[in-house]
Amino acid sequence: MHKYLALLATFFCSTTLAATPAHDQGKFTDIGLNLASVLGAADYCGGNSQKLIELFTGGLGHLGLSSADIETVLAHTQAKRKKVRANTAEALAGKPCPADVRESIQRSLNDLESAWIQAIQAETGVNLRHPPAAPSTTAPPTDTPAKTASNTVPPGKYSCYTFDAGQLNYAYTDVVIHDASRYSVGDKSGNYQLAGSGAISFTGTLSNAVGKFAIKNTGKPQIDLVFNGDPRSSMACTKAR
């Protein structure tokens, strides 16, 4: 048992994200399965694993995987996690974990957090410890006419947030505006058209959304998206840089 746990903490040493194509769902499934081995043991023995789960799930959103591929990775990870928890309980005959095993699990969780953060930053430039700052909610935003020097949406990355339970939450989704007509979300892309009123229509991956572009009173450009005509399904995407 002790040797098994010690090996888990080093799995990132054999995993090189920088050499992995963004669409390689199988590679990240393997990472998830290795990570699940630690999470499953922590489920039985105890350990602060919630942060690692959040970081892993959030990190996947930056890697250009499709939503279907992300769901596949997470499903395999969850299944392996449950299996390892059951195996750990069987190996210990239902008895509490020894103190040194619990300590080994927590070290593994901490090591995996740091390794995953470093790997995502090396691959995408995103620091999971410090996601883009959320738009300010201290005062109601005041729109100004959606005009720029060229009457287009300024190119750049727009980080998107949802509004839940009275607070803004980073959605781990970024809309990248490339020029006056092209945009992308992860590895998906399409075209957009900006009207004089600031209304935006899309083709491609955001074709089920309508947008509204404006310069907020903070001075930052922002795209507000509503999906499938339902205001409850919306995101605010503010230009990150």
Image (cartoon, helix red, strand yellow):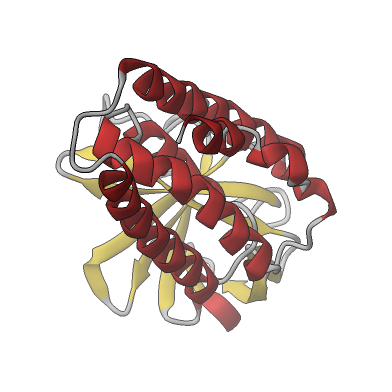
As drawn, 83 above or below 99? below
Q: Residue at x 48, y 30 (%)?
A: 2
* Horizontal and vertical percent position of residue 101: 39, 24
> Can residue 174 be seen?
yes
The residue at the point 72 percent across, 65 percent down is 180
Q: Is residue 179 left or right of residue 216?
A: right
Q: Position of residue 63 (x, y in %)?
A: 64, 55
Position of residue 4 relative to residue 64, above or below, is above
Count of marks, rendered view: 0
Q: Quadrant of the C terminus?
A: top right
Q: Quadrant where the N terminus lies?
A: top left
Q: Residue furthest left?
A: 165
In the figure, residue 140 lies in which quadrant? Answer: top left
Q: Is residue 216 visible?
A: no
x, y percent for residue 158: 57, 48
Q: Is residue 125 left or right of residue 105?
A: right
Location of residue 102 by image quarter: top left
Tell me the quarter of the picture where residue 24 sits: bottom right
Please indicate whether residue 100 sits to the left or right of residue 200 in the image. left
Residue 225 image position (x, y, % from top left): 40, 63
